[in-house]
């Protein structure tokens, strides 16, 4: 199949590479020339586990190409996938649709023959109607259908999730479009459940899923706070809960709050849609407010561990919003570091295996950037773990202790073994009791 993909970000690029690997002819389009130049010269523009080898293989075979030209990517395509950003509006927090609307308008004039336009970006209910209207207005004679094809990949596992999705949801109002999508997902037949629903249901499924997961995280975080006060261990509690198949054992890991480019923006967008539809989505509103407050309380824990000495060196390990990615958008780690800076902490040294460049773009020269884990720890009065990179689990704790000014750890990802850390003589705090 000939496929044009608009947007080469964390969704568009792994999707493009995956579809190319399945034997499709893929052209990825991005409006940022620097990204396209890098991709054309064989350089990946994001970090995703396992993506590089597949990318190189498919570039070499010619199955995937990159361009800034909408014409080149869209004309002759059987399928055009829209994977541009839908960031939160700075004031209302609703999903900002400017990139979607621009993409729909720009692609319209290049359509040739029957084309399915699939929206993979996370978009408010009714966007399919808007996209259809914009294309129709620009190109009244075009032969096309617009479908909703929400993306459920997890950053850090994007390649795995592309080839082994839990489900594929398609919101299509036409049989002809459904058949194109069935053809596209033929390699997944028998392995993955494919669900065909109304376009508006499909758009809602994505938000409803992300909001549910965000609430689940917020719930276990509140249980963690309770366990700390009540002398229980949140892991034992989570294990006991998770064995109930109605609850399930996923997303019951306590931490510093949810973050990333999806949950915060999607919960806010869903809450906004609730308000504009006159529906009280109080669970989602509560999770949003509680999750925002959590970052402040986590920063307060760190300051407490250094007796509120704002000039003490704080060593931070982890800046990405989770392990396996370089993405710092709405990262709890960056927000906690930001709260520390706002409180007046002026001696923060940070390290992340993949996200240093993105963190630097956000925090500039307010932080000291270390070249490796152990450099970050020199003379620190507290070590704060903020992202669950596997490497942090295997720190040489004796070396850590010898480098630090005080043996003091605030582990907000519960990466370390409490008994081991305390045996070596660290003061140790984690989430949800030991
Ligand atoms: P991103 O910001 O990483 O990438 C978007 C890309 O689109 C950018 O490279 C930008 O230059 C390009 N772009 C914008 N307008 C364009 C236009 N008119 N023509 C060509 N290129 C254009 O965003 P992302 O993280 O890949 O997310 C994309 C969408 O997918 C969002 O709606 C997001 O909510 C959704 N989503 C993201 C994830 C995730 O894990 N990141 C998961 C599921 C769904």
Image (cartoon, rainbow, N blue to C red):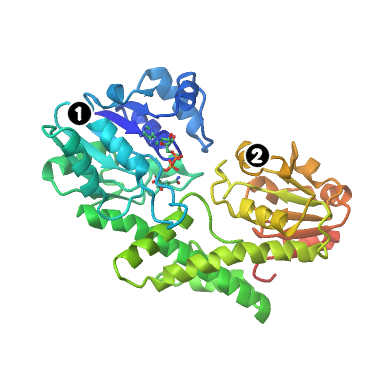
Q: Is residue 330 left or right of residue 21?
A: right
Q: Which residue is mark 1?
A: 111
Q: Is residue 231 visible?
A: no
- The front one of 312 and 384 is 312
Per the model, the C-alpha gap separating discs 2 and 1 is: 41 Å
The verdict on label 1 being within 8 Å of ligand 1 is: no
Q: Position of residue 148 (x, y in %)?
A: 26, 47
Q: Which residue is pictured at 43% across the width and 52% down the height?
A: 89
Q: Position of residue 183 (x, y in %)?
A: 21, 37
Tell me how many marks there are: 2
Q: For the residue labelled by badge 2, is the local secondary structure a helix, a strand or a loop?
A: helix
Q: Which residue is pictured at 60% across the width and 71% down the height?
A: 224
- The front one of 261 and 205 is 261
The verdict on label 2 being within 8 Å of ligand 1 is: no
Q: Which residue is pictured at 83% across the width and 62% down the height?
A: 423
Q: Position of residue 131 (x, y in %)?
A: 24, 43
Q: For the residue labelled by badge 1, is the local secondary structure a helix, a strand or a loop?
A: loop
Q: Is residue 370 left or right of residue 59?
A: right
Q: Is residue 231 left or right of residue 49?
A: right
Q: Could you tell which of marks 2 and 1 lies nearer the N-terminus?
A: 1
Q: Is residue 392 visible?
A: yes
Q: Position of residue 199 (x, y in %)?
A: 22, 52
Dot 2 and dot 1 residues touching (CB under 8 Å) = no
Q: Which mark is residue 90?
A: none
Q: Taking 255 as reference, is 7 above or below it?
A: above
Q: Which residue is mark 2?
A: 360
């Amino acid at each position: 199949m000939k496929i044009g993909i608009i947007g080469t970000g964390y969704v568009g690029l792994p999707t493009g590479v995956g579809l190319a690997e399945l034997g499709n002819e893929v052209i990825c389009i991005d409006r940022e020339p620097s990204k396209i130049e890098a991709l054309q010269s064989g350089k990946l523009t994001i970090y995703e586990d396992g993506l590089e080898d597949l990318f190189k293989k498919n570039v070499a075979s010619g199955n995937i190409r990159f361009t800034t030209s909408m014409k080149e990517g869209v004309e002759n395509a059987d399928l055009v996938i829209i994977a541009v950003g839908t960031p939160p509006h700075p004031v209302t927090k609703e999903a900002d649709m400017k990139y979607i609307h621009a993409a729909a308008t720009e692609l319209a004039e290049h359509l040739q023959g029957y084309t399915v336009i699939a929206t993979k970006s996370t978009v408010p209910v009714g966007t399919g109607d808007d996209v259809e209207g914009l294309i129709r207005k620009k190109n009244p004679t075009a032969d096309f259908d617009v479908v909703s094809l929400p993306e459920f990949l997890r950053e850090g596992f994007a390649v795995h999730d592309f080839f082994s999705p839990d489900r594929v949801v398609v919101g299509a109002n036409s049989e002809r479009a459904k058949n194109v999508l069935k053809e596209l997902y033929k390699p997944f037949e028998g392995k993955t459940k494919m669900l065909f629903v109304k376009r508006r249901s499909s758009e809602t499924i994505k938000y409803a899923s992300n909001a549910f997961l965000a609430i689940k995280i917020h719930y276990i975080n509140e249980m963690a706070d309770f366990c700390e006060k009540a002398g229980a261990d949140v892991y034992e509690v989570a294990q006991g809960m998770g064995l109930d198949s109605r609850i399930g054992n996923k997303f019951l890991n306590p931490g510093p709050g949810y973050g990333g480019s999806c949950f915060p923006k999607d919960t806010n967008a869903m809450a906004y849609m609730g308000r504009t539809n006159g529906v009280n989505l109080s669970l989602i509103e509560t999770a949003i407010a509680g999750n925002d407050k959590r970052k402040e309380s986590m920063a307060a824990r760190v300051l407490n561990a250094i007796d509120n000495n704002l000039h003490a060196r704080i060593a931070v390990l982890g800046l990405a919003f989770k392990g396996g990615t370089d993405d710092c958008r709405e990262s709890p780690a960056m927000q906690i570091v930001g709260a520390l800076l706002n409180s007046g902490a002026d001696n923060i040294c940070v390290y992340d295996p993949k996200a240093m460049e993105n963190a630097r773009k956000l925090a500039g020269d307010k932080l000291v950037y270390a070249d490796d884990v152990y450099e970050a720890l020199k003379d620190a009065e507290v070590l704060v773990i903020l992202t669950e990179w596997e490497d942090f689990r295997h720190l040489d704790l004796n070396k850590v202790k010898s480098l630090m000014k005080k043996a003091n750890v605030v582990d907000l990802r519960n990466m370390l073994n409490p008994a081991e850390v305390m045996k070596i003589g660290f003061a140790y705090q984690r989430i949800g009791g030991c």
